[in-house]
Image: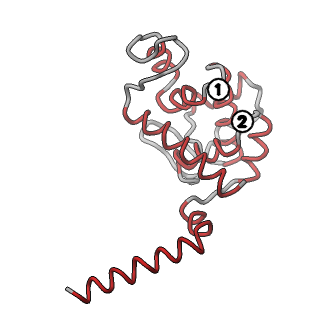
Amino acid sequence: MFKFLKRLIIISLTICILLVFFKTPILKVIYPVGYIDEIDVNSQRFNIDKYLVMGVISAESRFNQNAHSIKGAMGAMQVKEDTAKWCNDTFDLGVDINNLYNPSVNITIGCAYLEYLIDMFDGDVKVALAAYNAGLGNVNKWLSDKKYSSDGKTLYNIPFEETENYVKKVLKRREIYKKLYE
C-alpha cells in the first residue's frame, strides 16, 4: 500500500511539474489545429472569428477531414449535402459540392453557413451554434416558444441536451484555441 501511495504521489507531482512548465505544448497536443490556411482565408472572407471556426471544427470532427455522421454530415465541419448545395447556390461559392471531404471545400461551405446563421440571429453566436447543430427549423420553433425564449431572439433554454452541450463545448473550445494560438 505504501509503495502504491508513493508512486501515486510521484506521478502526481510529475504531472504537476509538466503542466507548470509545459502547459501550452501539452494543451496544443490536446487541442490541435489543422487546416489553418483554410480557416484563415474563410474566417476573413465570411467575417467570422477564426477561433470560433476552430471550436466548431474541433467539436464536429476533431479536425478529421474524413469524418462522417449517421445523419449524412461530412468532413471537418460536418456539412450535409443539401446544406452544401443550398450554400453553394445561394452564396455563389463556386465549390465542388461533390467533394465535401476536401477541407477547403468543406470549410468554405461551413463558414458560409455559419456566417449566414450568425447574421440571421443578429450576431447571437449561441443561437447560431444551436441552429448549426440542431437545425434551423428546430431553433425557429424554440424561439417562438415562451418555454425557451422570452423575446423570440435569444434562447435561455435549449431543449435538446446534445445541442446545449454542443454550444457549450464550441464556446469553451473557442476560448481555449484563442489562448493557445493567438
Q: Which residue is at a point 50% across and 29% down the rendered structure image?
A: 130
Q: What x and y, as percent, mark residue 114?
A: 64, 31
Coloration of the structure image: secondary structure
Query: As drawn, is 135 to the left or to the right of 55?
Result: left
Q: Which residue is at a point 19% across and 85% down the rendered structure image?
A: 1
Secondary structure at numbered mark 1: helix
Q: CA distance from mark 1 to mark 2?
A: 9 Å
Q: Is residue 182 above or below residue 24?
A: above
Crowdedness near tag 2: few (<14), some (14–19) or many (≥20) residues, C-alpha within 10 Å? some
- Asked which quadrant contains residue 97, the reply is top right
Q: Are marks 1 and 2 in contact (CB under 8 Å)?
A: yes
Q: Which residue is mark 1?
A: 118
Q: Which residue is mark 2?
A: 48
For residue 15, the mark is none
Secondary structure at numbered mark 2: loop
Query: As drawn, is 133 to the left or to the right of 25?
Result: left
Q: What x and y, as percent, mark residue 110?
A: 64, 36
Which kind of residue does numbered mark 1 sit on? Ile
Relative depth, front residue between 82 and 161: 161
Q: Is residue 21 above or below residue 63?
A: below
Q: Which residue is at a point 79% across and 44% down the rendered structure image?
A: 41
Q: What x and y, as percent, mark residue 21?
A: 59, 75
Q: What x and y, as percent, mark residue 108?
A: 71, 39
Q: Is residue 149 above or below residue 134?
A: above
Query: As drawn, is 7 to the left or to the right of 118?
Result: left
